[in-house]
Amino acid sequence: MRVFKDLWWFFSSENKSYLIGLLMLILVALLELVPPQIIGRFIDDITMETLTVNTLFMFSGILLLVAILAYIFRFFWRVMIFGAANRLGKLLRKTLFKKYSDMSPTFFGKRRTGDLMAHATNDINAVQMTAGQGILTIADSIIMGTAVLVTMAVTVSPKLTLIALIPLPFMVILTSYYGSVLSRLFRVAQAAFSSLNDKSQESVAGVKVIKTFGYEKDDLKDFEDLSEDVVNKNLKVAKVDALFDPTITLIIAISYFLSIFFGARMVINEEISLGQLVTFTTYLGMMIWPLLALGWFFNLMERGKASYDRIEEVLQTKSGIGTNFTTRQLPKGDIVFDIDQFKFDGSDDSALTDISFTLKPGQTLGIVGRTGSGKSAIIRLLLREYDTDSDSLISIGGVNIKDIEISSLREKFGYVPQDNFLFSTTIRNNIAFTDPTLNDKTIHKAADLAYIHNDIMDFHNGYETIVGERGVSLSGGQKQRISIARALIQSPDILILDDSLSAVDAETEKAILANIKKVRSDKTNIITAHRMSAVRDADLILVMEDGHIAERGNHEALMQNNGWYQETFRAQSLKESLNDALNDSLEGGRD
């Protein structure tokens, strides 16, 4: 019953729906008590040869009226109880989705996508069943069962009623035991389903890699093994689940035997009439559903409990990002980094050490360095995907970014990450993601600035081209440029290009950067890159090495340092020159 206690907050808010539903159930239960009484009277009248046409029509009329009223009341209890259960499902899905939206990358690093999807589907469905079918079964069991037992005792025989109840305690003991075993097995089965869900998601998302490496058969074998595991664990659940109905049916059969055996003797002894015995056995037949419903209730309750615990575990997980803010407005002014040390969760090594710099409004910051040097860590801290400790400070306009509401902070950024994500919709919708109402002229201008407009127009459906899952139908460079257009269309206060020009050629990179410089001369830009040419015109360039700033300055100053920047820039320039010369030579040969 603990799951009902956990869901009491919802039952309290939906008390009107549940009370009306329960009232309808009570009325249906009372109406269902009438037909057995009519049948008993009918048999007694036939036995005593007192049945008349008027009596027959009266009995028929009563039965018809009972049927119509029961139909109406059943409709309303379904609307009220199942409607409330559906609203619970909607509320839980909304709450869970918001939780996912609010969580930091650390959370998603520890949780599998398939598992999170299973929480939002199977687990919520199980809880919804508890709040709908669960309430119905326990209420119907108590209401119908009590009404039938009282009527049997009052209108037929309390003695025969007690005899019929003798086997019921055994049913309660057995179904309670089945329920406890079922809860444990169902939780294991749900975890197995999560693993299968995660495998399916990964295989579909990584199908190109799987095919490239010829791993289809092995991947299929892995899927089949996980699927077999899900089937086996669900079969264990089904075996325990299958014990409920036979157990209850056996108990009912024993009750039937006792009732008929002792009831027949009571008819012979004239303690009750034949019609009363028929009425009694009819009522006993009506007890089958309440008892089956009771077993079903234990089943639903244990499933709901296991699933709600899984959902609650996620909802109780803390984000790791502080939410105590003092302002919703992002102030304008200098971006200041003053970080003593920063470590990613679960790591003993420092990702950043002694990072200190100031970026004024309208300036461009370039961040370069080898892979793993800390470039993206700076960006992720600025976006508050992670938080610094109390000894470090990142501020904008003199305000600590921890004091700014996260959504207000992030909406001021136009962010193009290394791993460009496109939605499975049209190119137009991907570019206008932040505002679908934007007109075509604005969208085309953003695409032109990102040097992708001509490519789009070459597609058969132009801007209405469906890009597929994660932009699977596009090249890496095309995905990057569409992502840049999506960021530029916001005209953000701060534009961040996090190594997002790596898949385009040098000429395209130069054109995009020139466009950005032209239209964003009065706004702040941050560019991380492996190619020095991408940050050449930046007002401040940071050279990262093992999490600290090894060099800093503009391009001219760094070229005088004889350091890593100068060496890398010259090597890349030489390589580019050789490639240009080779291309010119090849074109000359064709002529």
Image (tube, helix red, strand yellow):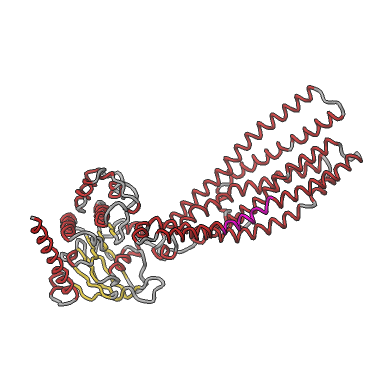
Q: Position of residue 313 (x, y in %)?
A: 51, 61
Q: Position of residue 249 (x, y in %)?
A: 72, 48
Q: Is residue 158 magenta?
A: no
Farthest residue, direction top: 53
- The image quadrant that residue 572 belongs to is bottom left
Residue sitting at x 59%, y 60%: 185
Residue nearer the viewer, 49 or 364: 49
Residue 577 is left or right of residue 358, and the answer is: left
Main secondary structure type of the part rendered in magenta: helix
Q: Position of residue 115 (x, y in %)?
A: 47, 59
Question: Can you give x and y, in whole percent of width and height, for residue 8 in the image?
Answer: 58, 53
Instruction: Say if residue 72 shows up in the picture.
Output: yes
* Residue that appears at 39% across and 61% down: 215
- Asked if residue 490 lies left or right of residue 151, the reply is left
**Most extreme residue toward the right, as rendered?**
269
Q: Vertical placement of 92 versus 563: above or below?
A: above
The image quadrant where one finds the C terminus is bottom left
Query: Hey, which quadrant is residue 175 in on the image?
Result: bottom right
The image shows a total of numbered marks equal to: 0
Name above or below for residue 253 compared with residue 319.
Answer: above
Q: Residue at x 66, y 47 (%)?
A: 139
Residue drawn at the location 21% of the way across and 62% of the way down: 361
Q: Is residue 461 above or below residue 198?
A: above
Say which quarter of the image contains residue 364.
bottom left
Q: Is residue 491 visible?
A: no
Q: Which residues are magenta?
A: 232-245
Front residue (pair 158, 328): 158
Q: Quadrant of the N terminus?
A: bottom right
